[in-house]
Image (cartoon, rainbow, N blue to C red):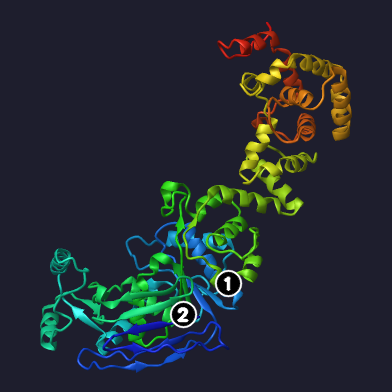
Amino acid sequence: MAATTLLAGSPWLRARLLPDAPSRPFARHIHLGRVLSSRSRSRARAFAEPISGPVRVRFAPSPTGNLHVGGARTALFNYLFARSNGGRFVLRVEDTDLERSTRKSEEAVLADLTWLGLQWDEGPDVGGEFGPYRQSERNSLYKQYAQKLLDSGAVYRCFCSNEELEQMKEVAKQRQLPPVYMGKWATASDTEVEKELEKGTPYTYRFRVPKEGSLKINDLIRGEVSWNLDTLGDFVIMRSNGQPVYNFCVTVDDATMQISHVIRAEEHLPNTLRQALIYKALGFPMPSFAHVSLILAPDKSKLSKRHGATSVGQYKEMGYLPQAMVNYLALLGWGDGTENEFFTIDDLVEKFTINRVNKSGAVFDATKLKWMNGQHLRSFPPDELIKAFEDRWKNTGILQESESGFAKEAAELLKDGIDLITEADAALTNLLSYPLHATLSSDEAKPVVQDKISEVASGLIAAYDSGELTQALAEGRDGWQKWVKGFGKSLKRKGKGLFMPLRILLTGKLHGPEMVGSITLIHKAGICGAVTPQSNFLTLDERFRILKEVDWESLVKEQESPAEPAIHATS
């Protein structure tokens, strides 16, 4: 059922629910009432009128900081809803917080949305027929509608000082009552008001809230939500400095921009009561509301900076792909009903429906996001993936221009272990490094060392000095595989008993990419001229020089009776 609104029990407004029209799946029957002034209240019945026209949604960030992942998900859900229903996605900047809002922050938020691929149809930079799209540029409109509410009696001038308001709060607290406005200005005479105006007393505009009744909405995500009006009290819509209050701005903006569906975070749910009252007082049709659950940290608290990176810009700088961010954010509270977790933006537009958004909080799992980034990275066409790695390695100074094809082979070898493009640097430099001494001294290497690794080392050194190993590596993968088979037979070793010592002796490490690819690439790095000195690469000549200096007898003795873990070299 589309969103509907009901004000029940109010002496000045009563609404009747009418069935939705089947031919308009996104139309709402809204129940508009005639706002009656305090001097002429009577019971009134209003009948519903559906909102016509296309689906129009908006994302309305406040430019007071970076774009939080929660805000990005809200923007994404609005974008997907608009695109999947042939509607319009509007970007509106809520910059009425004059002290904290900055144009720099606005530009950063817009840049992050653009990076995510969430292109808006109307906004401060592209314009549109319902502009301007910054709240700070719409003050004349807010004053116009505030005056309309004043003229109708829906709001009144309140001349209470801050001290008086604080006293009211204290009295309510002592009586264990909601902190509602209890001042006299709701019922003040014209003479009293004129007297204060003549004195130049500052005043706010307060909205006149019915003292009884309730308001109900059928939220598209959360179902029926209701509030009792007696807990609210008359609220301010215009401050004494002439600045409009958030709830008033939002209502006027959504109404005048003909927003049909308000999809936003659940923390805005309490604002709906005030906004609904303003909608009705101004005679505007109500949009449908859909309040999306919060994004939670692993400890189920609200995701915040103390849990690590929380802004889109931070993840962009860390090397995450926009495709992966969009995919992961969509799954925080939504799914298509299958086990599939890999979606492109086009897939999401095709499959997204608001009724599959879960009202429960979604936990942000950074490990899952990183895994998903790896899936998207490896889904790139091979040429694009290779170029991305090659450009990265050149930009960070690990590789230099070369026609050798080294970058292509390195990318193909390392891609399965890289989830972030920024990890490509460490993956390649790790492959090119030779931490032999540290590896041999480790506890994990102890079984391999004690399994007569010195015999494998002696045979390997002999094969290298004779040129046999170098010739095999020059023949590529086939040459290596043929050689290693014969080498294993000569030592009567196979499987892990052969390949683990070979890996340690040639790469200096216990673990890494596939053996044949690693060894052939290390050989190529020494002869192709693609690798820079900055990479700290050691050639095969340098590796065998280190290998020949290892005192295997001392190493084995130390591991049997560890005293000072160190590698002794022969003098």
Q: How busy is the neighbourhood of tag 2: few (under 14 within 10 Å), some, or many (20 plus)?
A: many
Q: Quadrant of residue 570?
A: top right
- In this rendering, is residue 140 above or below 526? below
The image position of residue 366, as x and y in percent, is 53, 49
Distance from the alpha carbon under mark 1 to that under mark 2? 15 Å
The image position of residue 444, as x and y in percent, is 63, 24
Please indicate whether residue 460 sits to the left or right of residue 38 in the image: right
Under mark 2, the amino acid is: Ala
Q: Residue 3 carries which label?
A: 2
Tell me, yes or no, if residue 455 can be seen here: yes
Residue occupying image coordinates x 71% and y 54%: 380
Tell me, yes or no, if residue 318 can be seen here: no
Mark 1 sits on what residue? 353
- In this rendering, is residue 562 above or below 496? above
Please indicate whether residue 64 sits to the left or right of residue 231 in the image: right
Q: Which of 114 and 368 is in front in this view?
A: 368
